Amino acid sequence: MKQILLLFVALFANMAYAQNNVSCTFDISMPMAVTEENYLKADSALWDEYAKRTKALYGQIDENPDKKDSLMRIVNMLYENVRQANIDLAKRFAAVPSGLHRLYMVRDLCPKDTLRKILSSLPYELRTSYHGRIIRKYIDTKQVCEGDTMATFKCVADNGDAFDWNSLDGKRVLLIYEGLSCMGGNRFDELVELYEENSRDSFEVLVYCDCASLDELKKRKSEYPSPFPFISDFMGEESPIRIKYGTQVRPTCFLIGADRLVRMKSEGLDIPLVKKHL
């Protein structure tokens, strides 16, 4: 208990601001027993502290708009550091179910040799658990990168029919993994506008939705009315879009050329970048 309290003290220490600066580090170095309970407490403390600090920073931005650029640099540094602390916690607590799940979620931020070493050190029950198996599948799979050929997989369109990847022959394709709710209304409107500016003979947009059923996929499409198809394979974290394409951030976008080669991969939807490639 004393160790847990020390961790909380370190994570929730008062922030010292000087010249609009803030500590961007997260101390997760306190020794703790590797238990499910300790991981959940440490993870919660980490993200609560991150939310607290970013809230304070955005408050400063509102009060000092002339210092927005310098404060946003601190926000970005804070994000990079909390992301690294998140990875470190996942690696340290991989021997408990929630820690192993988080290791899957940060798999693309860890060298595969590190993942392989961690996985081999786990008890048999965890190595062969759901997240143990799909981490292994990720390790053993070559992910699609820029310059690679587009990977196809069985999936269903929002109209209930099996999606025909051959319908994309000769077209440039913007494949979007999730994230419509993260775009905001203006960005989604820009996506629809981009779609309508280009001919259906030469350009298509596909939105992959992480849904559990066709009904859920249809509901998602109704929430974001659009002329382009929504697709899913209802496979969740084991889907090829997560394993083969290596997606985690929502949205992750792939611009695929008419020759089926991936021209661009980006975290977030960058319409100007897409237009540049188009």
Image (cartoon, rainbow, N blue to C red):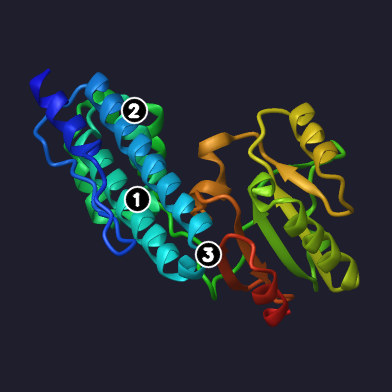
In the image, residue 73 above or below residue 35: below
Closer-to-camera residue (212/276): 276
Identified by mark 2, the residue type is: Ser
The residue under the point 59% across, 35% down is: 235
Q: Residues within 10 Å of mark 2 (few under 14, many from 20)?
A: some
Of marks 3 and 1, which one's residue comes earlier in the chain? 3
Q: Is residue 9 left or right of residue 97?
A: left
Identified by mark 3, the residue type is: Pro
The residue under the point 54% across, 76% down is: 147
The residue under the point 41% across, 47% down is: 56
| CB atoms of marks 2 and 1 within 8 Å | no
For the residues labelled 3 and 1, the Cα–Cα distance comes to 26 Å
Residue 34 horizontal/vertical position (percent): 16, 26
Dot 2 falls on a residue whose secondary structure is helix
Residue 65: give its label.
3
**Direction front: furthest residue:** 63
Residue 98: give its label.
2
